[in-house]
Image (cartoon, helix red, strand yellow):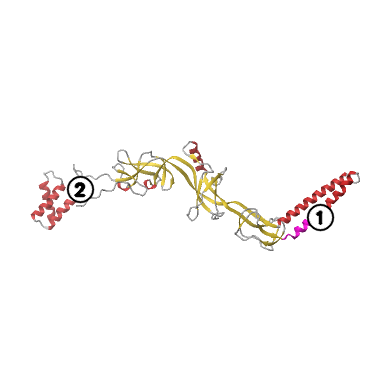
Amino acid sequence: MKTRRLIGKTGARRSGTGVPPVCFGEAGIFRNLRAGRPRHYLLATIAVATLFAGCGRNQPGGFQMPPPEVGVVTITPEPVALTMELPGRIDPVRVAQVRARVDGIVLHREFREGADVTNGEVLYQIDPAPDKATLDSANANLMQAQLLVQRYEPLVGINAVSKQDYDNAVAAAAQAKASRDIAAINLGYCTVTSPIDGRVGAALVTEGALVSQSAATEMAVVTQLDPIYCDFTESSTELLRLRREMENGTLKTIAPGEAKVTLLLDDGTTYSQPGKLLFSDVTVDPTSGMVTLRAEFPNPDHLLLPGMFARGVLEQAVNNRAITVPQRGINIGPNGVATVMLVGADGKVEARVIKIGQAIGNKWIVTDGLQAGEQVIVEGLQKVQPGMPAKPVPFNSDGGTNSAPPAASGGN
């Protein structure tokens, strides 16, 4: 109650002077000190002064805060290679299924499973005895047919042998020669060799197994691993959009042989060897609406194996005047609308809605809403609001600003 009387009396005495509440509060503190008032009088006066301390901020000549300093980037168009990350699968350049071409028993396996083999290297040896006997019989038949032709040849000139018999003997000799050649080829098939350079897999038959020509018994698989293909899939809608932008000159095309592809493996690492785009398919998968693209990669260490999943970062086109903004300077709301804060020519902060494309490193490509020369705030966003003044300072790549350091004060 005493506190109320003190405040009321002080306010009554000072109400006609035109001094703001903050002034009589401070005067009351000193007056109470000089008068030797009790402690609760002093506390009450200090509380009133603290409560109304902000009343004098708008007085003419009062202290005003300087505009906050914000880090900005000045929009400058630059050439940017447009990339796209696509899912893909590793495929071999060549795959040879080694199958039996004659009937017989496998005598030997000449290769080590999982080893690298060369074209013509022996893999299996099939029992050649039956085919060798067939070849010997064919040679005998050929010899007999050739002797008959030699015997008829002088006789047909004196009409001792009819012309028809002579022609039949010549045809029989030719047929015997063809049979001999087939028998020789079959005998050669008893030695099974690799048709390509590559890596051989598991042995699919063992010694003592009966292989068959009619059943085309599979004996081994040889796969060429260097180089190797990776087949990616891309949306036909995205492909049409790229072609449209290339036609109107917004983007510059990259030739298939020049487009570089970087491979991202399943463990998150980047494959050390860059690849090149070979071609894109001429048909669209009707079930998924995707187009297949094929890239070729060097694989000297055989790190890439057929069937592996990978993701390819593919350069598809070049935008010579792309506008990019660091990701930290763009706010994407729950509804997907992207906004940025700018410092206008009048030095005041402005909020603007933009459209963004794809991400390139730590930047977004802005497709609409920004012009060259504008200053986008990327540092100090929490210190400003639209409409308030701000002091723009160039933002550096280290995550700070390039403002000048304060001058060191000299010693006394």
Question: Which quadrant of the structure image shows residue 278?
Answer: top right
- Residue 319 coordinates in the image, percent (x, y): 45, 40
Disc 2 marks which residue?
54
Q: Residue at x 32, y 48 (%)?
A: 382
- Residue 295 coordinates in the image, percent (x, y): 54, 47
Question: Which quadrant of the structure image shows residue 202?
Answer: bottom right
Which type of secondary structure does the marked residue at label 1 adopt? helix
Residue interval drawn in magenta: 127-143
Which mark lies nearer to you, 1 or 2?
Answer: 1
Q: Nearer the viewer, residue 225 or 20?
A: 225
Q: Residue at x 19, y 49 (%)?
A: 53
> What label does residue 140 carry, if any?
1
Going from the N terminus, do you reach mark 1 or mark 2 first?
2
> What label does residue 226 carry, if any?
none
Q: Is residue 1 visible?
A: no
The three-letter code of the residue at mark 2 reads Gly
In this picture, is 376 found above or below 223? above
**Residue at the bottom extreme, as displayed:** 208
Which type of secondary structure does the marked residue at label 2 adopt? helix
- Residue 290 coordinates in the image, percent (x, y): 53, 45
Q: Is residue 293 found left or right of 405 in the rendered image?
A: right
- Residue 299 coordinates in the image, percent (x, y): 55, 53
